[in-house]
Amino acid sequence: MPLVTETMTRDIEAQKLLDSGLEEHRAGRLEAARSHYRNLLLALPEDPNANYLLGVVTVQLGDGAAGILLLRQAVSMSPSNVEFTHGLVSALKGSGRQREAEAVLRAFLHADPNEGRAHLELAHVLRDRENFEGAERHYRRALELMDSKPVILDALAGLLIASGREDEGESCFRQALALDADRLPSLNNLGLLMASRGNLDEAVELFHRAIKLMPQGADLWFNLAETLHARLSLDEAREAYDQAIALRQDFAIAHLHKGMAWLREGHFRKGWEEYEWRWRAEGFPNTPAPGIPWDGSPLNGADIFLTAEQGLGDILQFVRYAALVSDRGGRVILQVPQSMTRLMKTVPGVARVIPTTQPLGGGPVHAPLMSLPHLFGTTLDTIPANIPYMKVDDEDAAIWRSRIGSDGLKAGVVWRGNIDHRNDANRSGTLSMMAPLADLPGVRLFCLQKDPPVGDRPLPDTMMDLGPKLNDFAQTAAAVSCLDLIISVDTAVAHLAGALGKPVWLLLPHSPDWRWLLDRKDSPWYPSMRLYRQSRRGGWGPVMDQVCMDLTDLVSK
C-alpha cells in the first residue's frame, strides 16, 4: 500500500507527527510508525489520510480486523480516492474476505466506471473467486482505460489459459511482448506455455531471452533446464540445473530433476544420490516415516518398515528390494495401500503387510521403497530382476480362466493412467487409439481399466470389460495371469505384468519417465517387457502401427 505524503494540515504539530510516522514506516519500524499515526488520528479524527495510514500499518502488524475498520473509515470519508479503495481491497484480500473486496470495488466503479485500476483489481478478485467470465470482462475494460497494457495482457493470458483457451492466452502473451520485447514475466510465462504445448525449441529460446535479462534468476534457469530435459537435451539440461543450484543451493526440485536426468541415461549412482532430494522438494506428496532411517547396514533380525511412496507403479517396481533387505537380516514389514495388501503378502522377503491407514509408530528402523536402489548402490548391471517376484492366487486364477476362455490371442489393454499424475497428459492415450487392434484376426481384447473415463464409454463390442471385477491388485494379477499379452501405457498394470513375468508391450511418450532410459526397446527392470516409443510428441499413430504389425506376426506364429 503506497503511503500518502502530501501535507494534510497547516498544523505544525500534526505535520511533525505525519513526517515522523512516514519516516519510521519507510524504515520498517512499524510499531513506532503506528504510535505516530495514532497520535495523528487523535489530533485529526476526521482526516481520511490519518485513518488510512494507521489502517495500513495496523494491517502490516498483523491486526487485520482493526486495520480494515480504519481503512473502511478512510474510504467512507473519501470514496473517490482510488488509493484508499486499493488499500482496503488489499487488506480484505489478505484476510480472505474476497466477497467483501468485490463489493468495495463494485461500489467504487458504480461511482466512477472509468477508473481502470479498479477494473483491474476487480478482475483479479473475480479470477481468484473463479468467476472467469466476469474477470475477463473487467480485464478487457482495464485494457481500454490503462496504459500498462503488457501487465494486463499477462494477467488476461493467465486467465484465458486457466479457462482452457490456450490459443487466446498465447496471443495475449505475444501482444505483451510486441509492446515490450524485454518484459520478463511475458517471456517466462510464454516459455512455460510453449513448453507445456510441446513447442520446446521456442520455449528454450524464450527462456534464454529471459535469462539474458536476469541471469541471477534461479527459477528461470530451472525452467530452461526442465524444457531441455523434456527435449532430451540432457547434457544441456544438467548444466542449466547446475546454474539454478549455484544460485540457490537448497533448490531441492532442481537437485531431484537433475537426478532424474542422470537416471535416464543410466548413470544410476549419481542419479540415486540426487533423487534423495525429493523429500525436500516443494510439492512432493510424501514425507519420510517416523523412526530411524536405515543406512543399509546389517539389521541382525530387527524389524524394518518399508514404506510406500508416490504411485502404485512405483510400489510394484521397487518392492522387489524386500528380498535384499531380508537378506541383510531385517524382518520386513511392508506398508502399502489397502488395495495391494493381499498381493504384497506373496512378495519374497516380506514378513508382514500393513495398510497405509495404519500408523507406524516412531520406533523401528524404516526405509522408503524408492530409496532402496540408493542404499544398495544399484547400477544398470545390478538391478535385481528375479522375475516373477509375486504370486497369483490359484483359486482366483481359476475363476478368471473360466471368464476369459482360451480362444485366440488374449491381449489385455490399458490406454490411460492416473489423471492426477503430473505427466498424465503425455503418457496416456485414448480408447480410440486401441481400435486398430480390434480388427486384427485371431486377437481378443480385454479392458483392464478399472474405471474407464466417461468419454471412453461404451467400450466396443469386441472388447470384454474386466474392470468392474478387479477389486484389488491380487484380482488384477490373477486376470493378467490368464492373458497372453498386456499392451499398456506407462501405468501400474504394466508394472504388475512385468513383475509377474507376463509379456507386456509398453507404449511410451516421446519424453518418458526416467526409469525407461533412452532409445532402448527393452527394460532391465522387466525382462518380459518390450518398449514402443513415440518418435515425436503426441505421435501415437506410428506407435500403434508398429504394435499392430508385431501383433499380427505374433498371431501368425
Image (cartoon, grey):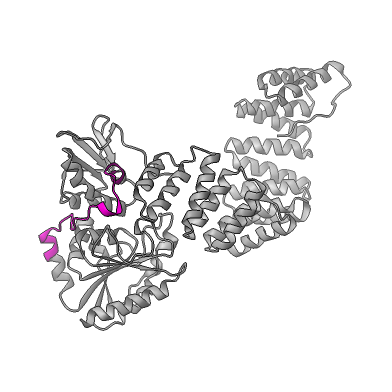
Is 394 in the magenta? yes
Query: With respect to residue 93, does 206 lie above or below?
Result: below
Q: Residue furthest right?
A: 10
Quadrant of residue 470 within the rendered picture: bottom left
| Image-based side of 395 in relation to 225, left or right | left
Is 24 in the magenta? no
Q: Residue at x 50, y 47 (%)?
A: 241
Q: Position of residue 427 (x, y in %)?
A: 40, 62
Query: With respect to residue 177, does 7 lie above or below?
Result: above
Quadrant of residue 545 within the rendered picture: bottom left
Q: Nearer the viewer, residue 466 or 343?
A: 343
The reply to whether residue 158 is in sight is no
Q: Which residues are magenta?
A: 372-398
Q: Residue at x 40, y 55 (%)?
A: 421
Q: Position of residue 202 (x, y in %)?
A: 59, 62
Q: Position of residue 153 (x, y in %)?
A: 68, 55
Quadrant of residue 479 within the rendered picture: bottom left
Q: Position of residue 175 (x, y in %)?
A: 70, 60
Q: Nearer the viewer, residue 330 or 45?
A: 330
Question: On the rendered image, what quadrant is the N terminus found in?
Answer: top right
Q: Residue at x 86, y 17 (%)?
A: 12
| Image-based side of 114 in relation to 337, left or right | right
Question: On the rendered image, what quadrant is the C terminus found in?
Answer: bottom left
The reply to whether residue 208 is in sight is yes
Query: With respect to residue 119, does 433 lie above or below?
Result: below
Query: With respect to residue 538, does 66 lie above or below?
Result: above
Q: Residue at x 61, y 54 (%)?
A: 208
Count the marks: 0
